Amino acid sequence: MHSTTRKFFIAASLIISLTACSSQTGTGNSAQSSAGEHPTLQIATPENGTTPDSLHGQETGIAITALNGKNGALANGAATAFYYTDKGTAITIQLNIASATVGKHYNAWVTDPTSEKTVSLGILESTGNDVRHSLRFDSKENLQSYTNITISLQPIGGDTTEGPIAANGILKGTKR
């Protein structure tokens, strides 16, 4: 390779690397598309320590847990709870678990261990018809004391009480 061509490739690589490492890359809570739209993105690790949410406002706390299979179910995943200035709560769940058997689905629950009150977070969805299941739950209530996450196998259109446990975890507050 000629010296001039080599210098060009080195300079081009350096410019691309510096551009990719710009302080603007990956910060903020929106990204601009070529059409000028601003879709909302959930940021896993924000630069200033908190993440504003379009529904709830500024984040005041976060709790996370690993989810592990129970009762013979092979499962792993994570749940994250976000707490906001409006006293609202958002909970996201990502779980890898075999598809539910015919006529059943996975439902997520969160329980306050002191009062033993339980809230259904809803049905986990698998958009790819594979082991990847997810859910986002939003509440106007402060669910910070609800730390026990449970995933149960439920009959479709059937019983609305918690069924056999397929996975669980305990949310623990953490600092960003």
Image (cartoon, rainbow, N blue to C red):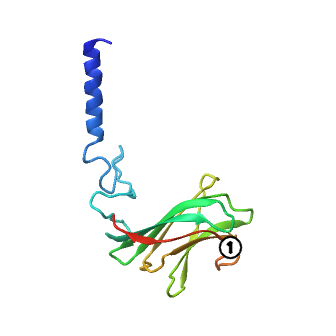
Residue found farthest to the top: 2
Identified at 66% across, 57% down, the residue is 98
Q: Where is residue 57 in the image (x, y as percent from the top left)?
A: 33, 70
Residue highlighted by disc 1: 164
Q: Is residue 4 visible?
A: yes
Q: Position of residue 145 (x, y in %)?
A: 44, 80
- Answer with the quarter of the image where residue 56 lies: bottom left
Return the residue nearer the eye: 3 or 34.
3
- Answer with the quarter of the image where residue 108 lies: bottom right
The image quadrant where one finds the C terminus is bottom left
Element under disc 1: loop
Q: Does residue 50 sit above or below 14 in this rendering?
A: below
Return the residue nearer the eye: 104 or 95.
95
Residue found farthest to the bottom: 115
Q: Does residue 16 sit above or below 125 in this rendering?
A: above
Q: Where is residue 11 in the image (x, y as percent from the top left)?
A: 25, 26
Q: Is residue 94 visible?
A: no
Q: Where is residue 153 in the image (x, y as percent from the top left)?
A: 67, 69
Q: Which amino acid does label 1 sit on?
A: Pro
Few, some or many residues within 10 Å of mark 1 (<14, 14–19, 20+): some
Q: Does residue 127 sit above or below 83 in this rendering?
A: above
Identified at 35% across, 53% down, the residue is 38
Return the residue nearer the eye: 175 or 123.
175
Q: Does residue 21 sit above or below 28 in this rendering?
A: above
Identified at 75% across, 62% down, the residue is 102
The image quadrant where one finds the N terminus is top left
Return the residue nearer the eye: 127 or 38.
127
Number of callouts? 1
Identified at 29% across, 18% down, the residue is 6
